[in-house]
Structure formats: structure tokens, C-alpha cells
Amino acid sequence: MTVLPADGLSLAADFPDPSHDQWQSLVEGVLRKSGKDVTGTAAEEALSTELGDGLTARPLYTSDDTSADPGFPGFAPFVRGGRATGNTVAGWDVRQHHALPDPVRLNEALLGDLENGVTSLWLAVGGPGGVPVSGLARALDGVYLGLAPVVLDAGDALDPAVRALLALHETRGVAKEAVRGSLGADPLGWTARTGTEPDLTAAVHWAQVCRHEYPGLRALTVDALPYHEAGGSAAEELGLSLATGVAYLRALTAAGLSAEEACRQLEFRYAATADQFLTIAKLRAARLLWARVAEVCGARAAGAQHQHAVTSSVMMTRRDPWVNMLRTTLACLGAGVGGADSVTVLPFDHALGLPDAFARRIARNTSTILMEESHLARVIDPAGGSWYVERLTDELAAAAWSFFQEVERAGGQAAALRSGMVGERIAATWAARSRDLARRKEPVTGVSEFPSLDERSVEREPAPAVPSAGGLPKVRRDEAFETLRARSDRHLAATGSRPKVFLAALGPAAVHTARASFAANLFRAGGFEPVHEPASVDASTAAGAFTAGGAAIACLCSSDALYAEQADAVAGELRSAGAEQVFLAGRPGEYSGVDTYVFAGCDVVAVLSSALDRMGVA
């Protein structure tokens, strides 16, 4: 579209349209200045980013990257949203999760949320982390059930929890046609979490009850979080949600529901991450794929997937947890722009235990700010028309459909879980991602990048212990670095100081600062305290400075030119002064006295683990 100013002249009239070749030529020039002599498509590939699942984010997208017609919001294939008005009428449903065993404390938290912007409640019921079924009425005391939909997370306590909730609605005079929310039945998701054999009997029964008596209540949830939380990729999460949804459709239609009636009993739950574009594309791709399933089943009119997005627990860190506020804000933005019907923002202290009132307030206010102050809900499908988002949606949908077909060929979701296929596939994905995390190719701010050893610890009441089950594991991006930091903490508690590394910087600051900063950041990620005093050393002063610093290991930091002149001599002096290990910040070379090289892309976790081992830090 050409934008015309008031005088009718195009603002771009005096600017020629550059070609893709011209842009690529300019890119080649910039890369040559950085030491990369590449031409043609290789120049563009050098600026591309791998996203997993065989997908790549390119540096430039043009109108040539347009995808198939995504249709209109509210119409098949529902890429642009399940409702014609999107979230413009009332915004997305702000749904907060609560897992508190004490009904009285839970009631206080629920009322506080509802009075301050939360519009639906997601309750853990039964089990070690949930409120007992017998305490559900007390927990919901004062909650207007006709206004605040309740979503259950009851696991194997589904039957008693549902009966208690429906009885509570009846006791309080809520008409059956006015009941909203979801019963949360997800037997295959429970199997993924616990390893137990799936039993769809209760889920099918409650779907039949909802179909005939509670038209506004959904019985089943297709929860993809177990696969995301085990380390699965976006395409795997989508593919397994499709396989689960199809399994439920088969069970419901076999029990007498029509395909359209069965589709309307399902709600889909996905993880939203700090990669906002991938989150947007994932939700759009999920709707596209499910619309295709519904069409094949003869339920095209009911093909609008109802989506619940939850900010990822995998991305939440225990160190520097305040940064989690930024992560969840980006994830919430992606979920809202991606068209989620309901959004749950996990409190920033989620990884530390039970959230406090402040953390819950920040979590619910995240949605409020994005809707009321940033006005994200005022636009229908804000990402629509973005060449990058449209292309990424199509590519992600294709990868997810391919994996869904693999699962179906393996006998369906239940068989794939039972055989171990799902666990093995996700484990391989997480292993590859773990290698990227260890090499800081996927940085974690405050943990693997820019950690603060002086941060004050955030203490929270421990969450109820959940017995280890036989299902899929739960992973976190900070796991490996958290292990290193915990070893450093134990050393601090036992000796009064952290493990130290002496930064032997050679030459003037202009020469050594870049690599000294790199090394300090790298070693802090493992809980090492860098000692950089004096600012610069040489062969005559290195030994004395190392001894005075009280470190057990040392790292040379300078330019390649100065390494060639001084590295061997300085390393020898450090050895003679008692350095147990000598590192060099730079690419591996042939320097005597140097044990290990640290550089961008090295396995930081392996390097620092080995250093702690040699120092005897348990």
C-alpha cells in the first residue's frame, strides 16, 4: 500500500526500489569487513539463525515469501484467529494457575486475583500440589462461579473433582447453560506425565454430560505442556497435540458424539516462550493444522481451535529470577498477538517454590498492561501480513504435520507413548538443545550470560514435593549452569570465598579488554570470581600478581599478536606460582603451559565442570 501525505505525493517517490541482489551485495561488503569472505546466497546464510525442526530465520523476507491465502479471522483455516473479532471485544481471558493444598490460603489468592484483573481460574485439585477435593468448596467461597469460569487440573482425581465442582455450581444456583470453563480431562496428557496406562472412560463420560447438559463447558484438554516441558521442539509439541486431539475425536465419536460435537469439547494448551515470533507462528500453525483435521472429519464448521497459552516453565531461571518478568512479558505478547483465547503468565518466582502475592500481581498485570496500555487486543491479528510470520507459520505447520504422521504410523498417541517413541524423540531434541545451551549458542541472560555472583537470593516457600513418576521428565534451560553455581555456593559456604580465576591480561587495556570481559563473563557463569588486579601483567609480574590474588587457576587474556610474543613465558610463570590450570581466551593454538582454551562456541559447561573437579570443588 502506498501512503500519501496531505499534498498527495508519495513519500517514497524519490527513493529507487533496491533489488535483492543489491542488498546482498551490501551484505557481502559488511561481512568482508568482519573477516568473512562469502558471496551470493552464502552471505545471506551467514546471517541466518537456526530455529530447530529444520527451520531457519533468514535476515530478509520479501513479498516473494508470501504463503498460501490464510483466509480471514474467524473463518477456515482459522490461521488469523478463531473469532472474526479476535480479542478486540474484551481482550484475551486472563487465566491464572493456582496449586495450593490449603483451601483457606487458596481462597485468599483466588479472590485477590479476581479482584485485580484475572478473569478465569485454573486450579490444581488432588495430588500433593493441589487442593483436596473436600476443600474445593472452601477454596471457592466468595467466587461468583457464574462470572469466573473454572478450569480443573485434577489428574487422576478427575471424577470426584468434577462432581464436586458441578455440585457447587448447582448449590449456588448457577444454571447449567451458564456454566463456563473446562473440566480439564486429559488422560493421554496424564499418561505422558506419569507413565500410567491411559483410560479414556471418564473423559468420554464427562464429554457426553457436557454435550447434553452443559453447552458452555468443555470436558477435555489437549495439553501439550508435558512435551514442551520435557524438552520437545515447537513442531513436536504441535504434532503430539494433533495426535492427542485425533485420539480424543475417535473416542468421542465412537461414543456417539458427532465430529462437530466432539471438536467443541476440546481445548488446546500450548507453551508460549520468549521467542515471540515462534510463539505467534506456533499458535497460528496449530489452528491451521487443526482446521485441516476438522475438515477431514467433516467438522469444518467446528474447526476453530480454542487455545490456552501458558508461559514456558522451561525458560524460567532460579538465578536472577527477576529477568523472568521480561521473559514472561515477551511470551505473553507472543500469545496475545498469536491469537490465544486464554493466557496464563507464570509468576517470575515459579522455579523457586510457591509464588508470593507480589509475584502473582506482576503476573496478572502483565496481561493487563499489554491489553490496556499497549493496546495489543485492539487489533485483529496484529501479525497478519508479516512475510516472516506467514512463512514461519507455514514451515512450522509442515514440520509438525510430518511428525504427526509419524505418530499416526506408529499406532497413534497412546501407542507412541507406550512404545517410548515420544520420549526418545524428545530426549534427542533436548540433548541437541542442551549442547547449544552449554556452548551458549542459546544464551540465558543472568545465568550463562551476564551472571551476577553478588545477587541476593530470592527465598520462597517450597512447593509440595511431587513423587517422581514414570512419565516424561521436566527440564529447564538453566539446569547445567545451576549445577555449577550450586557447587560454587557450597564452596563459599565451606571456605568463605568462591572459586577464583586470575585474569592475566597482557598489554594495554585497548588490547586485552574484549577478551578479559569475555573470560570474566564465562567464568562467572560457573560461579568463579574473576580476579583482575593488576589490570595488566607480563612475565616479570604475573607470578606475584597470581599469588596475591588468591586464585587457583588463571586465564590469559590478550590479542593473538601478544599471545605469540608473551603467552609461553607468562604461562610458565603462572605454573611456577602454583596455578593448577592455565586457560587462554582465544582459539586453540600451540602455546606451552596452556591447558585449555575458552572461546565463543566452546563447551562452557564441560570446561568449567572440569576446572571445578581439578580444584576439588564438590
Image (cartoon, grey):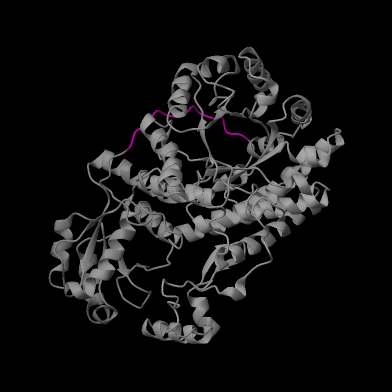
The quarter of the image holding the N terminus is bottom right
Could you tell me residue 339's position as x and y percent?
Answer: 58, 49
User: Is residue 331 among the parts visible in the rendering?
Assistant: no
What residue sits 47% from the left and 52% below the top?
A: 274
Eyeballing the image, is 183 above or below 501? above
User: Is residue 206 among the parts visible in the rendering?
Assistant: yes
Q: Tell me where residue 257 sits by quadrant.
A: top right
Q: Nearer the viewer, residue 243 or 335?
A: 335
Q: Main secondary structure of the magenta part?
A: loop
Q: Which residue range is magenta in the image?
A: 458-469
Could you tell me residue 9's position as x and y percent?
Answer: 44, 78
Could you tell me residue 65's position as x and y percent?
Answer: 61, 72
Q: Nearer the viewer, residue 532 or 310?
A: 310
Eyeballing the image, is 367 above or below 177? below
Q: Nearer the viewer, residue 568 or 5?
A: 5
The quarter of the image holding the C terminus is top left
Eyeballing the image, is 198 above or below 424? above
What residue sits 70% from the left and 25% below the top?
A: 177
In the image, is 611 to the left or to the right of 517? Answer: right
Q: Is residue 464 magenta?
A: yes
Q: Is residue 330 magenta?
A: no
